[in-house]
Image (cartoon, helix red, strand yellow):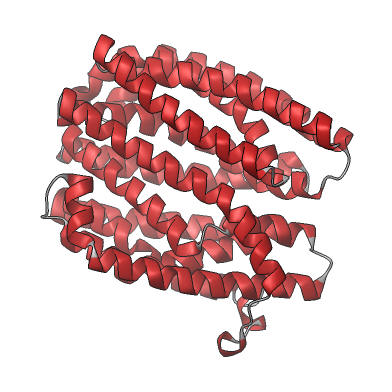
Amino acid sequence: MNLLKSSGLTFIATAIRLSVAFVINKMVSVFVGPAGLAILGQFQNLLQISLVCSTGAINTGVVKYISENKSDVIKKRKIIETSIVISMLASLFCAIFLYVFSLDIAIYIFNKDEYEYVIKTLSFTIFFFSLNQLVISILNGEREILLLTKVNILQSIVSLLLSITLIKLYSIEGALLALSVNQSLVFFLIVSVAYKRIIKHFNILKLSCDKEVLLQLVKFSMMAITTAIVSPVVLIWIRGYITDTISEDYAGYWQAIYFFSSTYLMLITTSLSTYFLPKLSSCKLNKEINDEIKNGLKLVLPGLIITSIFIYLLKDLIIVTLFSEDFMEISGMFKYQLFGDVFKIISWFFSYLMLAKSITKVYIFCEIFFSITLCMLMKVFIDCSGLIGASMAYTVNYFIYMIATIYLTKEYWKRNV
């Protein structure tokens, strides 16, 4: 399956998923306001961290190694069995941690203890999150794009119906509960859809953990876990800093602009990652890798720039449509945020090459270093310019990050190819 067809199918599933996310955020914006959106953002980031911990951060590695060993049935089976064992154990430890420290987590994330029960609910459902993500990673590695698209659409439909119902009944608490439990319902749908392709070939009581595969996945997970934990931790800090220095409503405004930015970019990154990670992992020659990156940039950049221009021209309409008139405060942030988005996407191609080729030290350095610089720039710009400074800091940080990833990737390739 080529880039265009693969990206097209994934684009459909991602567009549906993101439409659902916009509906949920719209409901929270209207019924609860900016402060509610900030709370939702905090919990979504906690969910990201929990999901990474509950899977052992191996899912990207599963995609890579299954793709590389697609024709080796024995090795592929070892990869899948080992990944199932890791996911089950990791989700158990994560569940115990969430339950035991639910009160402390609630106070740190929400600055209040009334949502402790939401954290405890998540501790009972995180197992399903973990296995769902593993099945999706296996399908991706197998290049089962059509089946993967069906699974993602099913997830979106369940999430939408559950969220609408609970938000109408319980407001912001309903939104948090929907995020906590939707994967439990989705799990049984995924089992039914993916049963013949994956699940029926494995006996849960006879799974083995291959030491060689385990070491490969653990090495790869170091990179994945860095991104998946550092990024939401930084976002939690940013919202907390804005809340402390300005107000909780302004933290909600930042959540709105960041949510919109990350969500429309996800249409691009999710569609491409479904194709690029397996493809780059299988490329052996330097020319093949260069061609894939050049083709990707040629496909994405013109459309991204045109889209950014239209978004800027229609920004006020977008704010009212996706959120409410209460969020017009973010109108002036768009021009900075959109520049930052373009820089972020360009750097994405090179950082993803690091992931695909296990350039571990360079990748981890970039993720941690530029997360720290983002926090520092946020503090400086917010203190000087208020809320709009957050988008300025975002743009400056990703411009420097883009230059660094291009340079470091090229230098690594000169020494190792």
Residue 142 position in % (x across, y down): 71, 61
Whether 317 is drawn above or below 269: the answer is above
Residue 100 position in % (x across, y down): 24, 68
Taking the image as shown, residue 314 lies to the left or right of residue 296, namely left
Residue in front for this viewpoint, 194 or 320: 194
Q: Quadrant of residue 127?
A: bottom left
Whether 402 is drawn above or below 131: the answer is above
Whether 292 is drawn above or below 165: the answer is above
Q: Quadrant of residue 122?
A: bottom left
Residue 88 position in % (x across, y down): 48, 74
Q: Quadrant of the C terminus?
A: top right
**Residue at x-position 55% and y-position 75%:** 85
Q: Quadrant of residue 317?
A: top left
> Which residue reaches farthest bottom?
205
Taking the image as shown, residue 159 lies to the left or right of residue 288, namely left
Taking the image as shown, residue 261 lies to the left or right of residue 193, namely left
From this viewpoint, is residue 215 visible? yes
Whether 228 is drawn above or below 73: the answer is above
From this viewpoint, is residue 314 visible? no
So how many labels did they put on this image?
A: 0
Taking the image as shown, residue 48 lies to the left or right of residue 124, namely right
Residue 328 position in % (x across, y down): 24, 18
**Residue at x-position 74% and y-position 70%:** 76
**Residue at x-position 21% and y-position 47%:** 108
